[in-house]
Image (tube, rainbow, N blue to C red):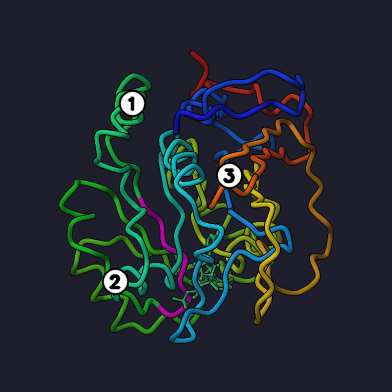
Amino acid sequence: MENPVTSCFPDPGGERALRGLYLDTILPDASAGGGPFIYANYVSSLDGRISVPDAAGRQCVPGNIANPRDWRLLQELAGHADLLLSSGRYLRELDAGTDQDILPIGSAEDFADIRAFRARHGLKPQPDVAVLSGSLDFAVPERLLDQGRRVVAITGDSAPEARLQAHERAGIEVMPLPGALRPGARPLANALASLGHARIYAISGPYVLHTLMAADLLDALFLTTVHRIIGGYPFSSICEGELLASPGDFRLTSLYHDPSGPDGCSQTFARYERARDPDSVLAGNATGGQ
Ligand SMILES: NC(=O)c1ccc[n+]([C@@H]2O[C@H](COP(=O)([O-])OP(=O)(O)OC[C@H]3O[C@@H](n4cnc5c(N)ncnc54)[C@H](OP(=O)(O)O)[C@@H]3O)[C@@H](O)[C@H]2O)c1
């Protein structure tokens, strides 16, 4: 973690430590369009892939682009969050033990500064969790509920009643919202706003991002690009689904070059802001800064 990164935009040339890069960044407590501020991050290859099939055929983050420096930044982004937005697919992988457990802020000494940051900003030790799922076919790890976190499942028109009741018995709030998971659906925006959280961090994959984009709910995108071409089928980018009715425009607000990516490969860390309101990045009671 000791190697510095170099700023490319907006103030090119300066070096700074990786640690704190995203903890120090300012994240507003509301979207410029009203409702919670929703942000996402991905690590991608130079050819735009965020997942490839493993030996068993399951889509996973490619092992040759995942790296501890990007992981550190993911943890720092989680440090700002009141709520993590996840998916039924992710909970199934957690249950099957095929994914890393990223729902909690890391308990290692290395992340003590992130835990201290949350305490300083009046945030709960661990963010609450919302799960988007049409099927409700997942189990919530007991340790999530044991940590005193609110866990909410947002589902659509056809959630099986038996699963809905089983989740409620297990202490999970279920929000069955007709039309909530359809592209562009207003019920999803209303549901996320009704939870009362200020900053929502989408740690989900490309289908949930498509749902968020179609409803125009994403405010900021953090994108790590590892400068490595990896190929692989099926192609999976950050956003998968039908052509969006309106493209989502973003503007670059920061870019850092990191010469110390996986196997010494370089990478860049970009932050993009939804191009609705040029001042949105400074709106509201922000977390971040010194
Ligand atoms: N490189 C990265 O930074 C990064 C980041 C995140 C994920 N990934 C990878 O991306 C891969 C693909 O993830 P994924 O395909 O499972 O995508 P996803 O977008 O994370 O999740 C899809 C799941 O979300 C639920 N869902 C809720 N609303 C939906 C809607 N309107 N449309 C579709 N699904 C909806 C469904 O759950 P139900 O099936 O329960 O109904 C579905 O299984 C994974 O391998 C993951 O590791 C990579």
Q: Is residue 149 magenta?
A: no
C-alpha distance separating marks 1 and 3: 21 Å
Disc 1 from disc 2: Cα separation: 28 Å
Q: Amino acid at mark 1?
A: Asp
Residue numbers of the magenta segment: 129-135
Disc nearer the start of the sequence (1/2)? 2
Residue located beneath label 1 in the image: 113
Amino acid at the residue labelled 3: Tyr
Residue at image mark 3: 39
Label 2 element class: loop
Residue situated in front as seen by the camera: 225 or 185: 225
User: Who's the residue at 23% across and 64% down the image?
Assistant: 141
Residue at image location 36% in from the left, 79% down from the top: 137
Q: Is residue 290 above or below residue 87?
A: above
Q: Earlier in the sequence, mark 2 or mark 3?
A: 3
The correct choice, above or below, for 8 with respect to 90 in the image is: above
How far is the residue under mark 2 from the one under mark 3?
A: 26 Å
Cβ atoms at labels 2 and 3 below 8 Å apart = no
The type of residue carrying mark 2 is Gly
Q: Nearer the viewer, residue 229 or 149?
A: 229
Residue 196 locus on image (x, y percent)? 44, 40
Is the C-beta of the residue carrying label 3 under 8 Å from the nearest atom of ligand 1?
Answer: no
Report the residue marked by disc 2: 97
Residue located at (77% from left, 23% from top): 10
